[in-house]
Image (cartoon, helix red, strand yellow):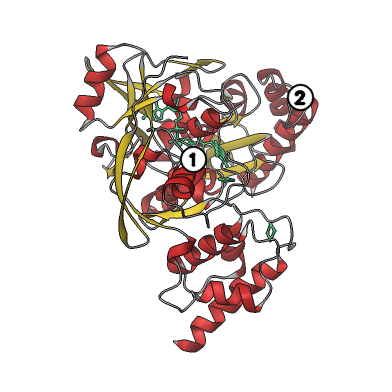
Amino acid sequence: MRAYLPAYEMETPRDLEAALGRMASEPGVWRPFAGGTDLMVLLEAGKLPHQKFLNIWNLAELRGMEVSSEHVTLGALTTYTEVQRNKTLLREFPLLCRAAAETGSVATQNRGTLGGNIANASPAADSPPALIVYDAEIEIVSAGGSRWVHYASFHTEYKKMNLHAGELIRRIRLLRTHAQWKQYFRKVGTRRAQAISKICFAGAARVEAGRIADVRIALGSVAPTVLHAVRVEELLRGQRPGSAVLQAAQDALNAEIAPIDDMRSTAPYRRNVARNLLAEFLEVLAG
Amino acid sequence: MPERARKIRVSCVVNGGAASFEAYPMARLLDVLREELKLTGTKEGCGEGECGACSIEMDGALVNSCLVPALQAQGTKIRTIEGLAIGGSLHAVQQAFLTHGGAQCGICTPGMILAAANLLARYPQPDDAQIREGLSGNLCRCTGYMKIFESVVAAVRRAETRA
Ligand SMILES: Cc1cc2nc3c(=O)[nH]c(=O)nc-3n(C[C@H](O)[C@H](O)[C@H](O)COP(=O)(O)OP(=O)(O)OC[C@H]3O[C@@H](n4cnc5c(N)ncnc54)[C@H](O)[C@@H]3O)c2cc1C
Ligand code: FES
Ligand code: FES
């Protein structure tokens, strides 16, 4: 059933300070509204319990991109379209660009934001695996100040995250150390455009003299939160990416993931595909 | 349920002219366009961002109007299918859809044409992959897509021969 519109309030704060002030004055009551590509779907389905929203779409403090020698920092309102148009991101962060290109279609990419994707906290979201591979940190702001947290530990359990009432995600910062790494991304869905992932894999590794010197791997839709596959990474460090290590790595991955059956796929299918994607990743590293 | 939100007044530019309407802040721009501004060319298919029947341009970007709350239309420039023809002359994409049978029942057509026009504004000479990508958010239950694809290719060719 559709939502009863008069029950939903929305205001446009004049700047970030005003937005945070509003959120602090009634903790938990006001919730940010960015591109609306998750929130409006809930509203239309009559499943949006929250009723007071702050329109953050025009907040300049949450937009834009900065490049320093160590980091690329993106505003939380960065859209998927903006990600794909950025030269530095295309050159150094191809996994994020691939994830953006495979998220919805043009219209969704024009409105959907990275901050919204993170805060929506879906284990099937497609940019989080790339963000984990790049060791992203996110800046969380409130009327009381600002803190940076490692994104890999941001989601704590299904739909739960390290974000409190009165807090907003302001920026996302990526380490620029992965540009020379070999990188691999694959989203498996029902069709290429529009479909929500059945499973999504992002991996990158620094290969030196035929050995995996360092590696980062993350997957979507295989656990209650987007998963950083630390045990697989540990097992792979120092190894040659070949058939010798494949079985052990696949077993480690199988032990690390906890996929479920849902409307999009089944747990056994997801386990199988996860194993296959890991094999493909190792082939890329060997090649 | 308690009634809390008040209707707000939103001012924007629609198809080149000043427009102003009253709506609840979370009302869908799709409904406002159709019911307040009487621009019924914009269609509703799914109401959840999947089908593209409600596609419009906001500040030059293609968006699904079923997912835009009225409040966020404040101060924007909007183009709907009604704003595509200039005077009596159809947009190249509209003409191509007519000539090449790109429309059957017509429900997907306004969104499809806006998506194609928006694509051509970004890539005047799109390759096949870019055309498919540009239209991938627009579903059609009638044509089987080939005639739509051919219409867009024809519109590109017509623009090329003119240039
Ligand atoms: C047709 C369609 C296809 C889609 N396909 C995909 C897909 O392939 N992959 C995928 O991952 N997602 C997909 N999505 C989901 C959605 O587009 C993304 O999750 C998007 O990134 C959400 O961003 P938004 O700005 O629209 O969020 P909103 O809907 O505005 O907000 C989502 C949530 O995040 C919160 N929020 C937003 N910004 C902030 C912030 N700065 N700080 C704190 N909280 C914030 C909001 O309060 C809300 O809870 C799709 C959606 C649609 C409609
Ligand atoms: S009605 Fe808006 S996308 Fe289908
Ligand atoms: S012409 Fe009928 S849906 Fe496309």
Looking at the rendered structure, which numbered label has been put on residue A267? 2
| Residue B61 appears in view | yes
Q: Which image quadrant: the C terminus of chain B?
A: bottom left
- Give SS at disc 2: helix
Q: Nearer the viewer, residue A34 or B9?
A: B9
Find numbered disc 1 in the image and state the secondary structure of the residue it sits on. helix
10 Å crowding of disc 1: few (<14), some (14-19), many (20+): many
Label 1, on which residue?
B67
> Residue A285 appears at what percent x and percent y?
61, 44
Give coordinates of residue A73: x percent, y percent: 31, 38
Q: Amino acid at mark 1?
A: Leu
Density class for disc 2 (Cα within 10 Å; few <14, some 14-19, many ≥20) is some
Instruction: Identify whether A183 is placed above or below A28.
Output: below
| Quarter of the image where one finds residue B112 | bottom right
Q: Position of residue B62 (x, y in %)?
A: 46, 54
The image quadrant that residue A13 belongs to is top left
Spatial CA span between label 1 and label 2: 32 Å
Q: On the rendering, which quadrant does ligand 2 occupy?
A: top right
Residue located at (41% from left, 44% from top)? A79
Along the viewing direction, whichever of A109 and B18 lies nearer the viewer:
B18
Left or right, A193 with respect to A29, comes to right
Residue behind label 1 places its C-beta within 8 angstroms of ligand 1: yes
What is the chain letter for disc 1? Answer: B
Q: Is residue A181 visible?
A: no
Where residue A178 sits: x, y (%)? 44, 41
Q: Mark 1 or mark 2: which is in front?
A: 1
